Image (cartoon, grey):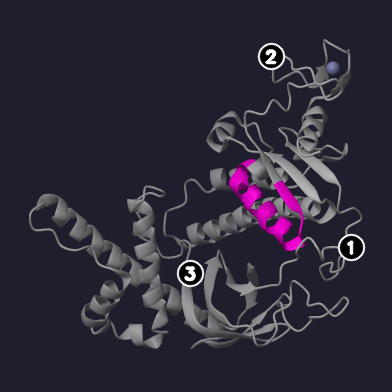
């Protein structure tokens, strides 16, 4: 099973310059390719009889070598895979656009989502050193997935990469003033048979692999579990959000492009990152908790666009999206050998009485306590829904 890994880089000035140059080339290649492909599309629309074939990533790269690289010496200062990968990403982006799963690709601006991909062998040299093509050895703050295999019962850990494992590419990106590296690596996933035998490194074995938990994603709280546990989620970002809007307001009159404006932009970007990190952390903790402690996790399939419009979800989930919540839960469950059950969105989880099973006709959103007309049972609305969800599989 492929897992992603992303961590911050600890750089010196020379490395920072090299990475910035790579970002520049990636952006230039992308923008050049986008301009060209847009012209081709315009031409084909204007001349339906004399259409030009839409280029592949390889075509684009061939043209780039002939037309662009010769004009711009600085292309030779960076890895040749960087513009290649940028054009491949552009081609993928057009493909998604043609399939109508995404919008039209957009031109990249300097300093906005700067990133590039390096192709070639990436080697993890130690707990915090990684070797990438062309640029060389980079340091990280965090421990890399390396060298701590075989922790329990002779079976390899899920998080360890043995030196033989090949990582074939990595992506380096910038957020405000920090740089990150990300790559994918293969891990042994746990199957249902060996779940009890191999806990992940640093984790205690799961107490009960047979337990079933229903999860009701909430408005006020992050979620309610059928076990009665309520997870409130992070509150701390609210104060940063207030600070952010104040900062944006205070800086509204600065001259765009001035030194003070740049300073303020960096501060704002840092704050954005902090808030996003708190939310990301909240969501990761929740999905890990669920996958780690329960044999089966039952969630409701949510209509995401409807949810967003109604603000019916806690901000951490609304912001990251239900799709992300489900994605994390899916891979974490697979990794730990737990089962994820997604219940149809029309399942009446909140309208049904968890005591006698009678279904209510209508339930308004502000009824926080569920009262059954049939048996007189009273229970917290969210807990009632979570219990109903957990009953789906048992
Ligand atoms: Zn009842």
Is 55 positioned to the left or the right of 176 in the image?
left
Q: Position of residue 254 (x, y in %)?
A: 47, 51
Q: Nearer the viewer, residue 57 or 342?
A: 342
Q: Residue at x 59, y 47 (%)?
A: 323
Q: Magenta segment, which residues?
A: 318-340
Spatial CA distance of label 1 from label 2 is 43 Å
Q: Nearer the viewer, residue 336 or 72?
A: 336
Q: Label 1: few (<14), some or many (≥20) within 10 Å?
A: some
Q: Position of residue 322 (x, y in %)?
A: 62, 43
User: Looking at the magenta stretch, what is its main secondary structure?
Assistant: helix
Q: Are marks 1 and 2 in contact (CB under 8 Å)?
A: no
Q: Nearer the viewer, residue 305 or 173?
A: 305
Q: Residue at x 64, y 68 (%)?
A: 1
Q: Which residue position is annotated with label 2?
A: 362
Q: Is residue 223 magenta?
A: no
Q: Position of residue 66 (x, y in %)?
A: 22, 82
Give SS at disc 3.
strand
Q: Residue at x 87, y 63 (%)?
A: 196
Q: Which residue position is annotated with label 3?
A: 115
Q: Label 2: few (<14), some or many (≥20) within 10 Å?
A: few
Q: Which mark is residue 205?
A: 1
């Amino acid at each position: 099973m492929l897992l992603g890994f992303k961590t911050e880089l600890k750089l010196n000035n020379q490395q920072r310059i090299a990475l910035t140059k790579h970002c520049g080339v990636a952006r230039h290649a992308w923008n050049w390719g986008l301009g060209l492909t847009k012209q081709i599309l315009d031409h084909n629309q204007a001349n339906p009889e004399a259409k030009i074939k839409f280029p592949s990533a390889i075509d684009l790269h061939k043209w780039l070598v002939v037309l662009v690289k010769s004009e711009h010496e600085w292309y030779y200062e960076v890895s040749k895979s960087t513009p290649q990968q940028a054009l491949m990403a552009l081609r993928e982006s057009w493909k998604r656009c043609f399939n109508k799963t995404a919008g039209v690709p957009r031109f990249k601006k300097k300093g906005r989502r700067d990133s590039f991909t390096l192709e070639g062998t990436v080697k993890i040299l130690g707990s915090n050193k990684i070797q990438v093509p062309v640029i060389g050895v980079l340091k990280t703050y965090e421990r890399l997935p390396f060298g701590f295999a075989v922790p329990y019962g002779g079976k390899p850990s899920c998080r360890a990469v043995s030196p033989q494992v090949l990582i074939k590419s990595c992506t380096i990106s910038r957020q405000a003033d920090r740089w990150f590296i990300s790559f994918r690596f293969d891990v042994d996933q746990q199957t249902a048979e060996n779940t009890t035998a191999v806990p992940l490194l640093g984790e205690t074995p799961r107490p009960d692999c047979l337990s079933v938990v229903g999860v009701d994603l909430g408005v006020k709280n992050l979620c309610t579990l059928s076990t009665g546990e309520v997870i409130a989620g992070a509150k701390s970002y609210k104060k940063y959000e207030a600070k952010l809007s104040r900062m944006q307001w205070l800086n509204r009159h600065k001259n765009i492009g001035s030194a003070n404006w740049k300073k303020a932009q960096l501060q704002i970007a840092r704050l954005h990152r902090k808030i996003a990190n708190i939310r990301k952390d909240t969501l990761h903790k929740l999905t890990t908790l669920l996958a780690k402690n329960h044999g089966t996790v039952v969630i409701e399939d949510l209509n995401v666009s409807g949810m967003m419009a109604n603000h019916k979800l806690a901000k951490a989930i609304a912001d990251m999206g239900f799709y992300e919540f489900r994605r994390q839960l899916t891979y974490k469950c697979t990794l730990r050998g737990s089962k994820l059950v997604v219940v149809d969105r029309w399942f009446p989880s909140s309208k049904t009485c968890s005591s006698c099973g009678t279904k209510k006709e209508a339930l308004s959103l502000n009824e926080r306590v569920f009262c059954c007309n049939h048996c007189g049972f009273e229970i917290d609305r969210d807990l009632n829904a979570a219990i109903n969800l957990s009953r789906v599989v048992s």
